[in-house]
C-alpha cells in the first residue's frame, strides 16, 4: 500500500491439504473456503463467491442496524439473502432484505436507499483496482 493509503481490511491465506481447501486468517478469526465436490473440492467451506456475498450481506445488515439505531427504529432481526448470477458476460447480485413488519413503507424505502450506500455495496459497484505481486 502507498503511504497515506487507509487499510480497510486484510487477511492471510494458506492453502489446505485438500485439493482446493483454503485456510483464511482474518484478524483473530479463522475461516475455511473450498469448492463444492461437484468441481473437485471437498466442500470444506463456502466457495469464494459465497464469501463475497457473505461480506455484502453482513455489511448490509450491520449498516442498516446502525442507521435504525440512530433513528430509534425497531428493526427487529435482519435477514439478507443474496445470490450472484451470470447472463453471458453480465454478472448481477440480487439482494433481498427482510426486517420488522411494523416498519412503514417510508422507513422501508429509506432502508433500501441506505442499503445501496453500504461500504461493501459501493465497493462492489465500482469494482476494485487489484495490484498483484508474485514472489
Image (tube, grey):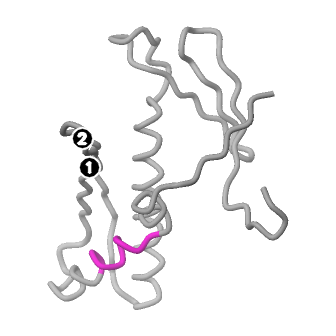
Residue 5: give x, y in percent of width and height.
Answer: 76, 66
For the stretch drawn in magenta, the main secondary structure is helix
Q: Which residue is mark 1?
A: 92
Q: Nearer the viewer, residue 91 or 112?
A: 91
For the N terminus, give its image quadrant: bottom right
Q: CA distance from mark 2 to mark 1?
A: 5 Å
* Start-end of magenta stretch: 111-118
Q: Which residue is mark 2?
A: 85
**Up-down relation of residue 35 to residue 106 (above or below):** above
**Up-down relation of residue 28 to residue 101 (above or below):** above
User: Which residue is at a point 73% across and 47% down the rendered structure image?
Assistant: 27
Helix or strand or loop: what does disc 1 sit on?
Answer: strand
User: Which residue is at a point 24% across and 53% down the rendered structure image?
Assistant: 94
Q: Nearer the viewer, residue 61 or 84?
A: 84
For the C terminus, give its image quadrant: top right
Residue 117: give x, y in percent of width and height.
Answer: 40, 74
Q: Is residue 74 left or right of residue 135?
A: left
Residue 109: give x, y in percent of width and height.
Answer: 21, 81
Residue 64 occupies which quadrant of the picture? bottom left
Q: Which mark is residue 76?
A: none
Residue 40 occupies which quadrant of the picture? top left
Contact between labelled residues 1 and 2, with CB atoms less than 8 Å apart: yes
Q: For residue 112: magenta?
A: yes
Q: How crowded is the residue under tag 1: few (<14 C-alpha within 10 Å), some, or many (20+)?
A: few
Helix or strand or loop: what does disc 2 sit on?
Answer: strand
Q: Nearer the viewer, residue 70 or 11?
A: 11
Residue 68: give x, y in percent of width and height.
Answer: 39, 82
Amino acid at each position: 500500500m502507498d503511504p497515506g493509503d487507509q487499510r480497510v481490511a486484510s487477511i492471510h491465506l494458506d492453502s489446505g491439504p485438500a485439493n482446493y481447501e483454503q485456510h483464511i486468517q482474518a484478524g483473530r478469526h479463522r475461516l475455511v473456503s473450498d469448492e463444492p465436490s461437484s468441481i473437485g473440492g471437498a466442500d470444506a467451506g463456502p466457495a469464494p463467491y459465497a464469501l463475497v456475498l457473505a461480506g455484502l450481506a453482513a455489511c448490509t445488515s450491520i449498516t442498516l442496524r446502525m442507521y435504525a439505531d440512530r433513528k430509534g427504529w425497531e428493526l427487529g432481526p435482519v435477514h439478507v439473502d443474496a445470490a450472484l448470477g451470470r447472463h453471458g458476460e453480465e454478472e448481477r447480485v440480487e439482494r433481498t432484505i427482510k426486517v420488522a413488519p411494523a416498519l412503514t413503507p417510508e422507513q422501508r424505502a429509506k432502508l433500501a436507499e441506505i442499503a445501496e450506500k453500504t461500504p461493501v455495496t459501493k465497493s462492489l459497484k465500482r469494482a476494485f483496482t487489484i495490484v498483484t505481486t508474485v514472489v
